[in-house]
Amino acid sequence: MAQMTPNTGSIERVRETLPTPTTIHIVTCAIWAGIIAVLQTISMLGFGISAVIVSLNIAVSLYVVAGLWFGVWGILGACIGMIIGNSIGGMPLITTLLFQLATVFEIAVPALAFRYFACSPLARDMKSIVVFILFGALINSLISSFWSAWYVVLGQTAPEFWLMAVWPSWFGGSFVGRIILGLIALWVLSPFIVRFRGHVPNEPGRWLA
């Protein structure tokens, strides 16, 4: 009989103690997808009125907290919601799908940071607030907004000047929106979310349940 090393045994015990996903997590994903789809549809339909509406996108500003609340289910729900909202708004499917690389990145970065630095989604302490601003508003917005604007130019759906003309407004809108709406969402809604069975705690290895 093969002997189990102490390290292997500890890993197995951790695996055994990790909760498994249930139906409530799938339902949570679907509800979050619906919320994001509605918000993104409103933003897309407002594009013809003003680019500012798109820059100050409520869906993009809010879905960044999805990974802090629901783990992988929040990321998946946000992507599905963005695909639905962008499609209703008339965005080409290939562009919509590639934009989801930015969506995953934007949500995963703060989720990873909160787990690494042991932060709380309640965001009542200075460490959690600073980590959210850095990883949930600044870094993820800076990189993903450039990718999104660059892809629009690369796909020849906009002239080259679009990159430098629109990227700053996309970054600024996301950065400011996430600091304001993201933190408000954490302060106001997190106390209820963390008691919800669909919540996935910000702990190492906890992404599905």
Image (spheres, rainbow, N blue to C red):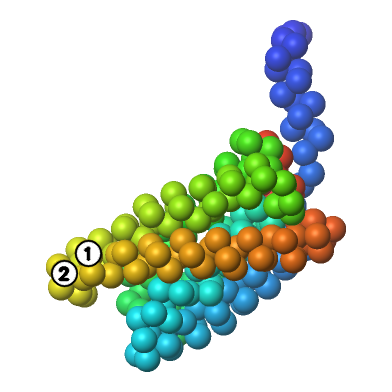
Residue 192 sits in which quadrant? bottom right
In the foreground, 126 or 193: 126
Q: Image check: 62 left or right of 93?
A: right
Q: Which mark is residue 164?
A: 1
Percent of width and height locating residue 35: 62, 76
Percent of width and height locating residue 49: 37, 91
Q: Which residue is mark 2?
A: 161
The answer to whether residue 79 shows anywhere in this view is no
Percent of width and height locating residue 195: 84, 58
Going 39% across and 80% down the picture, which residue do you hit? Answer: 52
Residue type (three-letter) at the residue carrying disc 1: Met
Determine contact: label 1, label 2, CB under 8 Å.
Answer: yes
The answer to whether residue 103 shows anywhere in this view is yes
Residue type (three-letter) at the residue carrying disc 2: Phe
Quadrant housing the N terminus: top right
Residue 17 sits in which quadrant? top right
Going 44% across and 49% down the picture, which residue do you hit? Answer: 139
Tell me if residue 161 comes above or below residue 128 in the rendering: below
Q: Residue furthest left?
A: 160
Tell me if residue 40 comes above or below residue 49 in the rendering: above
Going 35% across and 81% down the picture, which residue do you hit? Answer: 51
In the foreground, 151 or 132: 132
Percent of width and height locating residue 185: 67, 65
Q: Which mark is residue 135?
A: none
Q: Image check: 199 left or right of 46?
A: right
Q: Residue furthest bottom?
A: 49
Going 21% across and 75% down the picture, which residue do you hit? Answer: 157
Tell me if residue 110 comes above or below residue 46 in the rendering: above
